[in-house]
Image (spheres, rainbow, N blue to C red):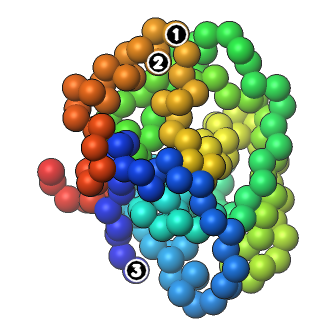
Amino acid sequence: MAVRPILIAGDPRLITPALPVTAFDSELADFVGELFDTNTAARGAGLAANQVGDPRAVFVYDLIDSGVRHRGHVINPVLETSEIPEMMPDPEDDLEGCLSVPGEWFPTGRAEWARVTGVDLAGQPVAVAARGYLARCFQHEIDHLAGHLYLQRLIGRNRRAARKMVKNREWTEPGNSWVPGRAS
């Protein structure tokens, strides 16, 4: 397996909606393995295909929430959530980061509960319901596949701070990426 470069904010592939997966073959299985390898090398909670420049609707997750490890993948996911809060997120409890916005964390409002449905590598139905951190991860990764970075969900001063950060880090142009496990 291989660790792939992760695109950084500013690349148009990150804001392009994913395409449904139609070929369930060994290449797809290898690709999902590479997503897991890349996510592990990056110490991420999840990774969507478009974060490594692939247009397919697939994401992986591998995280620990309340002492329990959750690991899996979902192809052609569909998301259902409880109500998303409209108030300012808690600056301590609602911090969120992103492998495509490396080193940055912002309070982000997310639904407490989420359910994702889709299929696995064999094309068999998958359904996972979650609360807390795993629910946040599902919402984050499916946002990626819809062509949205979490920065677009920010409100008020957090949105202003994120815009300033993107400009200061010169992430307004395509072509930026990083490779987990390599010194920059």
Q: Position of residue 107 (x, y in %)?
A: 52, 20
Quarter where residue 166 is shown: top left
Q: Give, as a three-letter code, the residue at label 1.
A: Gly
Q: Residue at x 28, y 38 (%)?
A: 171
Give me the C-alpha separation between circle 3 and circle 1: 42 Å
Distance in Å between CA atoms under marks 3 and 2: 37 Å
Q: Secondary structure at mark 1?
A: helix
Query: Is 155 left or right of 74, judged from the image as shown?
Result: left
Q: Which quadrant, please, contains the N terminus?
A: bottom left
Q: Which residue is mark 3?
A: 1
Identify the image quadrant of residue 119.
bottom right
Other residues around mark 1 within 10 Å, as few (<14) / some (14–19) / many (≥20)? few
Residue identifier under label 1: 156
Q: Nearer the viewer, residue 173 or 135?
A: 173
Q: Are marks 2 and 1 in contact (CB under 8 Å)?
A: yes
The structure residue drawn at horizontal position 53% and vertical position 53%, both measured from the top left corner, is 16
List the residue tagged with mark 2. Answer: 159
Q: Position of residue 147 (x, y in %)?
A: 56, 48
